[in-house]
Amino acid sequence: MRVHVVDHPLIAHKLTYLRDKRTDSPTFRRLAEELVTLLAYEATREVRVEPFDIETPVAPTCGIKLATPKPLIVPILRAGLGMLEGMVRLLPTAEVGFLGMVRDEETLEVSAYANRLPDDLSGRQCFIVDPMLATGHTLVMAIDYLVGLGARDITAVCLLGAPEGIDHLQAHLADVEPPVTLVLGAIDEKLNDQGYIVPGLGDAGDRLYGVV
Ligand SMILES: O=P(O)(O)OC[C@H]1O[C@H](OP(=O)(O)OP(=O)(O)O)[C@H](O)[C@@H]1O
Ligand SMILES: O=c1cc[nH]c(=O)[nH]1
Ligand SMILES: [Mg+2]
């Protein structure tokens, strides 16, 4: 697995306000969207393009455009929805598939409650978005789903990751070819006893959408 932590002062600045417990939901949503735009810039560095002939007001020229088949963005509900708009803005031709997953707060095991993806992902570039990579159980299950549908080009974009979750993902993906790419805004210190990222930002879904 390729792990890429995007080192940029604007990301660190926005993450700091995102972490702050005084940040309200509207501001949290705006910051998450701004952050994903910055991370997506890195995550899409190898997005597939094809040549495209145009004419400027001065001369014909050949440029590039996003290639087909269209990239697929997969937000993991709920919290991943907070990253969808920013990602779509950067990849306007992309299609969107959905995975609903929730982890049990006691056992930290994950279960899927919704799955709306194309039947065949072979040849598609897939971008999973989820703000938090904690134990890694959610991302492992999401990647397994996509691989099971034929995906071989997967990039996961997360705002924060824990070392334990990254290690779990590395171990699980050791045999997946070609390797998955993981793009992160920061790697935090550790998980606490409840499986929360420390210092983290709390429960991303609750901070985006409220406690349900
Ligand atoms: O790496 P893990 O230990 O699996 O945890 C990460 C998951 O936890 C959060 O979702 P949550 O289960 O809280 O659901 P929500 O988005 O509906 O709040 C987060 O958005 C990830 O999907
Ligand atoms: O710190 C964490 C860990 C899992 N999910 C969250 O939303 N936050
Ligand atoms: Mg949650």
Image (cartoon, rainbow, N blue to C red):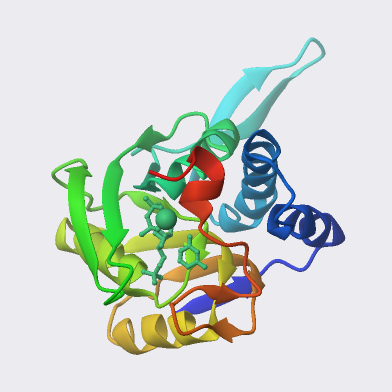
Along the viewing direction, whichever of 25 and 154 lies nearer the viewer: 25
Q: Is residue 115 visible?
A: yes
Residue 182 at x, y percent in the picture: 50, 69
Q: Is residue 47 visible?
A: no
Q: Is residue 55 left or right of residue 161?
A: right
Above or below, 53 relative to 67 = above
Question: Which residue reaches farthest top?
Answer: 57
Residue 7 at x, y percent in the picture: 77, 68
Q: Residue at x 20, y 56 (%)?
A: 112
Along the viewing direction, whichever of 205 and 172 lies nearer the viewer: 205
Res. 171 image quadrant:
bottom left
Q: Is residue 207 left or right of residue 58?
A: left
Res. 154 image quadrant:
bottom left
How many numbered marks, from 0 up? 0
**The C terminus - image quarter:** top left
Above or below, 51 relative to 100 = above
Q: Is residue 115 left or right of residue 50?
A: left
Above or below, 56 relative to 68 = above
**The N terminus - image quarter:** bottom left
Residue 87 at x, y percent in the picture: 54, 40
Q: Residue at x 63, y 20 (%)?
A: 54
Residue 117 at x, y percent in the picture: 21, 42
Above or below, 111 relative to 129 = below
